[in-house]
Image: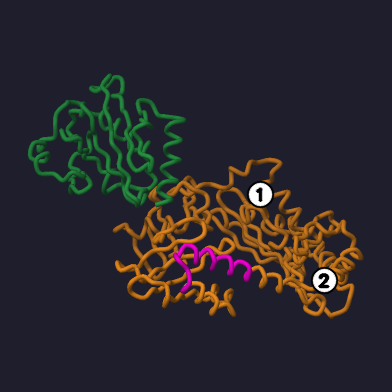
Chain colours: A green, B orange
Amino acid sequence: MASMEKRLQKELQALLRDPPLGVTVDSDKTSRSLSEWTVDLEGAPGTLYQGEKFQLAFKFGPRYPFESPQVIFTGSNIPVHPHVYSNGHICLSILTDDWSPALSVQSVCLSIVSMLSSCKEKKRPPDNSIYVKTCSKNPKNTKWWYHDDTV
Amino acid sequence: MSLMQSDDNFYLIPQNNERTCFEGFINVHGQEHQFQISLPPGGTFSQASVQCDLSLQQMLQGYEAVIEKRLQQSQDLATFLLELKTIAESQAQKMHLIMLPPPSYYKQLLTEIEELDWKNVSYVDTSLQQLHLRAMDQGGREHILKIHISSEHPVERPICTVDLPIPFNISWSSQTGMLQFLYKQFQNMLETLQDFWNQLDEIDSKTWILEPENPIRGASKRRIALGNNSSVQIQVDPKNPRLPPECKLLGADHVINPLNSRIGEWNPEDSILNNLERVLNVQFPSPANSKKEDFNMECGICYAYRLEMEIPDKACDDQRCGQPFHQTCLYEWLRALPSSRQSFNTIFGECPYCNKPITVKMPS
């Protein structure tokens, strides 16, 4: 537990000191134990999401970084994207199967921004309505099929 | 009658509804002692009894009858407990007085310290039983000899605590002037260790020592930074500092494998530092041309340098990666992966950073 907090403390400091473009940590909404974070994202210029603002909720378990964080979109604006369900769940392999402790909050945020940026048509995933009705609250409990790597 | 009291003197908690049995703690000179009081039904004190824990019993030895009587005559428990506390405290003080050495002890000790010269005394406690003596060696290094003097001094030998790389075995006989003799033995010991400290001082000042962080005089091990996440650990023999030390190279294989040790070129006339540089054919990064932060690289998994006692000494062997990890962290990550393979106590997996093959042994 202590090593998880230490690492998150370092990640938070680095992100506050030197945030990448379009990524802002809301340090007021970050819990004292550092186990829950809120990160504001901005759609990259020149993409379908330009000018849009989104919010990501990170939840870290005591085994972080050996286990991936739980990451979902929250707030009023959930991006309309073929890999983002309307309840905020994200179908992104690095959040489950392809997670590695070499990844970080920053790299996850940048992956999500880049996932949005490469989108060519704003639409929900084809199984959105059934998934949203039946899924678990935690997207990590979903057995994802990473069927499409183009977006 | 106050049934539950909790102030600085004691705590008292009833153990049953009838209030015939109480347990609590009483504070005697800042230490808490447990006791139990039983009253006969009806709450009268005429047949009451008290039981104490062992240390309190020892303090109250010889007073049991008096205490029992006071309890039976007392009007309430609070008054009785205050009385008990007073008796215990005065007894404890008496016992302490008995433990102090006789006056002749102090007389003898003061004479001995005067012989030794007060300027060599760096600390003495109020009871004059802890004495710290200061000694400067030829290299201008200060050393402290901590002596716990026995009350039976000089018949019984004192207990010495020193910061030396070898055991400090003293010879002792029950004569006067023994403190001075002891101090002399300490100085002689320091003299034999001069070359050992000279050698290590040179290494400490001209290289980056990764471990121990702040070497004490008694430390004969050093882990010296070599750069590229590698280091060499040496253990110097305090009695023969110029002989080749025990060496252990740590780091990525591609960095340390070329450093094949040409131990035959070790020259006992030369300093350890020069010998190491020649034998390993390296130039140690020094405080003159580098920063320490360049060498204590953080673990790529937990982002810390120190994990309890461990430092990140397992590095990825890929030249472009070279990412260091704590053995424990890397093991923890690789063992849970379905793509890893275990053979005996070694796990074969992939570097979390570059996906090149990496192996790690099970932490012991």
Q: Badge 2: few (under 14), some or many (20 or more) residues near its Cα, within 10 Å? A: few
Q: Which residue is mark 1?
A: B208
SS for callout 2: helix
| Label 1 – label 2 distance at C-alpha | 53 Å
Residue B356: image location, x then y, percent: 40, 52
Front residue of this view, candidates A113 and A68:
A68
Q: Which residue is mark 2?
A: B103
Q: Are marks 1 and 2 on the same chain?
A: yes
Q: Amino acid at mark 1?
A: Trp
Q: Quadrant of residue B186?
A: bottom right
Query: In the image, is residue B326 above or below residue B164?
Result: above
Q: Badge 1: few (under 14), some or many (20 or more) residues near its Cα, within 10 Å? A: many
Which mark is nearer the camera, 1 or 2?
2
Front residue of this view, candidates B160 and B285:
B160
Residue B23: image location, x then y, percent: 41, 68
The magenta span reads B72-92
